[in-house]
Image (cartoon, helix red, strand yellow):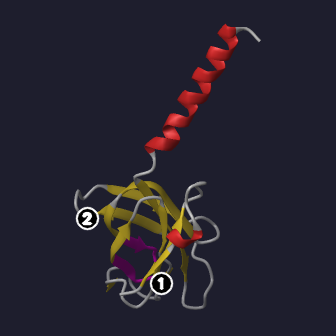
Amino acid sequence: MTIRFQVLLLFILVTMSCPILAQTDRGAIEGLVTDPSGAAVPSAQVQIVQIETNSKIDLATNENGMYFAPNLPLGSYRIILEKKGFHRIVREPVLIRAQTHARVDFTFQVGESRKTSASRVKPRCLIFLPRVWPQVSPRSSSISCR
């Protein structure tokens, strides 16, 4: 190998690792949306709102009723769910910590979407799962119940 090739290879490896290091101050919100019978609710509208800045991300649940909002800045969030034929759900605050995924599941109640079901996350636990990083130990996981 020539020195020129080695330098090029080193440059490529260094520049490819930079985006990984830049994401350490981010987290994610994920969850499952079901109806009262426990069946998944596909195509439900999910809005994630950062409370401090009022910035919004609009998503929809997949065919399995799952939603995933990656790469979120740290902070407190409000989650709003809507689907025709079900009550609207608002849950806050959902706290995002560095390098974690907050799991927030929802169960829709049948009824008019104009009615809102609001909660402060007290009835359920939020499970913070560490992202897959070599330096994160299993002890860095936390369960937050308020």
Q: Nearer the viewer, residue 134 or 119?
A: 134
Q: Residue at x 50, y 35 (%)?
A: 18
Kind of residue indicated by mark 2: Ile
Q: Position of residue 105 (x, y in %)?
A: 50, 78
Is there a contact, CB below 8 Å, between mark 2 and mark 1?
Answer: no
Q: Nearer the viewer, residue 110 or 127?
A: 127
Q: Is residue 85 visible?
A: no
Badge 1, how many Cα within 10 Å: few under 14, some, many 20+? many
Q: Which residues are magenta?
A: 79-91
- Please tell me whether mark 1 sits on a helix, a strand or a loop: loop
Q: Residue at x 58, y 70 (%)?
A: 138
The picture quadrant where one finds residue 57 is bottom left
Is 63 above or below relative to 112? above
Is 108 covered by the magenta stretch? no
Q: Residue at x 41, y 59 (%)?
A: 98
> Which residue lies under the disc numbered 1?
108
> Which residue lies under the disc numbered 2?
51
139 to the left or right of 23: right
Quadrant of the frame with the C terminus: bottom left
